[in-house]
Image: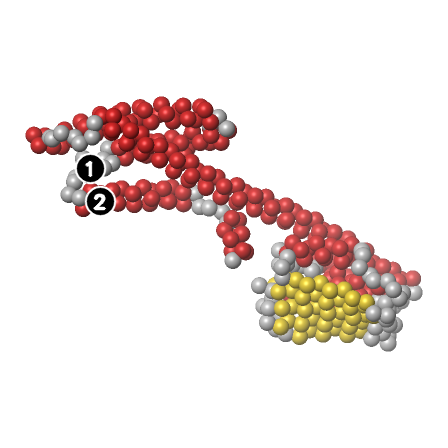
Amino acid sequence: MHNRFQRLFTKPIPGYLPVLAHSLIWSAYIVAVIYINTYQGVNFLIGHPSIHIIAQVIIFYANYRYLIPALLARMKIARFLIVNGLLILGLVTLGISAYHGLRSWYLGAELDHFPLSYEEQFILRSFELLLFVTLACIVRFAVDWFSFQQKTRELENTQLKTELSFLRSQLNPHFLFNTLNALYGLAIKQSTETSAGIMQLSQLMRYMLYETNEEQVPLVKEVEMIEHFLALQQLRLPLDFPLHFTVQGEIEAVFLEPLLLMPIVENVFKHGAEFASISLTLDEATLTLHTINGIRAKGILPTGGIGLTNLKRRLIHLYDNRHQLQLSQTNERFQTTLLLTIK
């Protein structure tokens, strides 16, 4: 419900909607007035509010469109009250005269004595218009509050997209730096696998340059990238290094943010030794990435670095209440578990 309420503020309001809403409300008001007068056996022209409805429309929109934003919103309260007082005085005076002229024309010879004195009519019509001033204030403040909330959400979304773009831009050089370290190790050994490593790197860079500009990418693409990265790492690792990567579940229809899983996979090789196991599991709407790897130095929990710090910030923005990131260490191994609730 909270997310649905937030989306209400971020969704742009069509330009025709306020005009349509005002038209429907005034139409409903006029229909109700006509119905009540007809039910009482009185013609709308000489019933209530008759021609005074024009004054109600004028006082409402004079405040809604001009006086409230120009005076009341700028705390010019005294001027606001004076202008409204003069406006009400003029509208009531003209309205009473116009109403009795219309009533005299409509009834003709059947014209009878009006039950209210001029003073009583003046007080009644003035109070009536004062109610419409109050109504205009309520409606205008509600609309302005809604508009302010929408603009605030739009600004927050813009700032969020800017930060996410910055965080994503950090990943490319960070990832390239770690990958070049792997190639450097092969080059130092003058390994025959260096060319194969460059080929794997080219696959990775092609993906990062051309396919990670979208807000979300297919999970199968991310899995392919992980496989290329693991193949590159295997070139520099001993032949008997235990490395396992498994994928379970129907991941073909799943989308997620680009390079969201890679920092955890990179972290395995940044701090790992002796063995590494990586599993990716999709169970209904929960995606789980679990890694286990050996650690070089006991007592050191590898939680620093740009990669994981970057990941934590992205998860807060993208999966605020829909993720769990757990890091744990025993004497000989380091484990990472990431759970994402996929929409």
Q: Is residue 78 visible?
A: yes
Q: Amino acid at mark 2?
A: Ile
Q: Position of residue 34 (x, y in %)?
A: 22, 43
Residue at 68% x, 69% y: name it: 288
Amino acid bearing label 1? Gly
Q: Secondary structure at mark 2?
A: helix
Q: Position of residue 235 (x, y in %)?
A: 84, 69
In this picture the colour scheme is secondary structure
Residue occupied by mark 1: 47
Q: Is residue 251 left or right of residue 171?
A: left
Would you say the residues marked 2 and 1 are in contact, meaning their CB atoms lie under 8 Å apart? Answer: yes
- The image quadrant that residue 326 belongs to is bottom right
Q: Secondary structure at mark 1?
A: loop
Single out the residue that lies furthest toward the left.
Answer: 109
- Where is residue 151, by image quadrant? top right
Mark sitting on residue 36 = 2
Image position of 27 with respect to 293: above or below? above
